[in-house]
Image (spheres, rainbow, N blue to C red):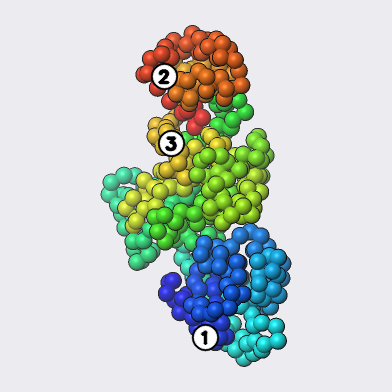
Amino acid sequence: MKGDYQDLVDEISALLGAPATLENRDFRLIAFGAHDSDDDLAMDPVRTRSILTRQSTADVRSWFEAFGIARATGPVRIPAAPDAGVFRGRICLPVRYRGIVQGYVWLLDQEPGKPGPGPAALDAAMEVAQRIGVLLAEEAKAGADLSREFLAVLTAGRGWQQDMAVAALRAALGPGGDGLHAAVCVTPWPGEAPASVPGAAAVCVVPRRGGGEPGGATGPGAGTRVGPGPEAAGEPALAVLLRLRSTDALAPALAAAARLLPRAAEATGTGGKGAAATATGGKGTGGKGAAAKATGGSAGATAVTTATATATARGVTAGVADPVRGLADLPAAWEQAVAAARAAAAQPRFGPVAQWSAIGPYRMLATLAADPVDDPAARTLLAPAHRELARTAEVFLDCAGQAGRAAAALGIHRQTLYYRLARVEQLTGLDLDEGEDRLLLHMALKAARLT
């Protein structure tokens, strides 16, 4: 399919005598024509960045969309804007199928005073753009039509049933099924799956399990939402199978997950606790750093942060699994994506989009804590009346038992810390000087966030 796009882009470049680039409607680069010029203005920052990072920032997208390209049915000329990094004007050819925009072909316009492509050449180029639109629409439709096969893989039992489901999805995907993919989980996701997700091989909605109702509990951290994952409390989830170009290219998957969050939040329509600032994340891969990488800079990161703030406040999170080649490991990848989404709900520092490889101990805990934790030692400590003691114990254990670090993190005197830890030992019957007792309590406190 990529070869088809490249051939058509090269055809447009030949018709108009200028290098062309093809982007989907989300401004992600699909193909670009060869560029052979000594003119520095021909490779302005916007074009260079689009080719090197395979995407445009939110600011660039807003700039070009302001010229009505999403509504246009013919070529649109856009003037140069050096302040925006656009040193040369552009000609935009909207790529449509049955009236719906599927993407855009971009060409550098001629310098002022020089003749540009004539009407006949532009008409011929638009005919090629229509052929591109058919391909893009068919690709999106193929992903939507595979929802049944994709869902079967994610919900089939182990053994021969799962093997048959994987074989059916592989046959439906054709040669593309043997490529690299990443599984993405967005939860909760009420309603139907979106008609298309750019770059997706398949999309489906995984229904709630066991009839459980969405809900939350109060975790060990004061003010922390403890969100049930789709496997734990029956939340419906959107599953996306995204195509990847390499094992190191997870940025598109992270960006796709971030773009889906506001749609999930809008569908839920249920307010929630939590500050919008938590959408910026922290040290985790799914936080602000991941947003910046996924969108290509501070401007893109700001746009993603703004777009996901409402989603975070409403408890919508997403998880991205490690890349897999082929489909045999897809069920395991889906479990990773679910675990990452649950970790994102449990720990705001992971950000609203968490990558499985970056959630640390939650990789194991998300699998173990499918049911509410009810360990006798931690039961009393996890009661709402002892929330501050539970938080103190968790921070102390997070700091590897270093009293000075823990007291500083909690903003309390060291003697206050010692008093609280003594109360924790009284309530739990555990000895915090013993490694196994520490491990038990630490696991119980972390697992409580997931349930």
Quarter of the rendering containing residue 296: bottom right
Image point 55% across, 17% down: which residue?
389
Question: For this view, does 248 lie left or right of residue 386?
Answer: left
Q: Secondary structure at mark 1?
A: helix
Quarter of the rendering containing residue 148: bottom left
Pointers 2 and 1 in contact (C-beta within 8 Å) = no
Gap in angstroms between the C-alphas marked 3 and 1? 51 Å
The front one of 237 and 179 is 179
- Please rate how many residues cluster around mark 1, counting C-alpha atoms within 10 Å: few if below 14, some from 14 to 19, many from 20: some
Q: Which mark is residue 14?
A: 1
Q: Position of residue 400 (x, y in %)?
A: 45, 23
Dot 2 or dot 1, earlier in sequence: 1
Q: Position of residue 125 (x, y in %)?
A: 57, 84
Gap in angstroms between the C-alphas marked 2 and 1? 69 Å
The front one of 246 and 329 is 246
Q: Secondary structure at mark 2?
A: helix
Residue type at the position of mark 1: Ala
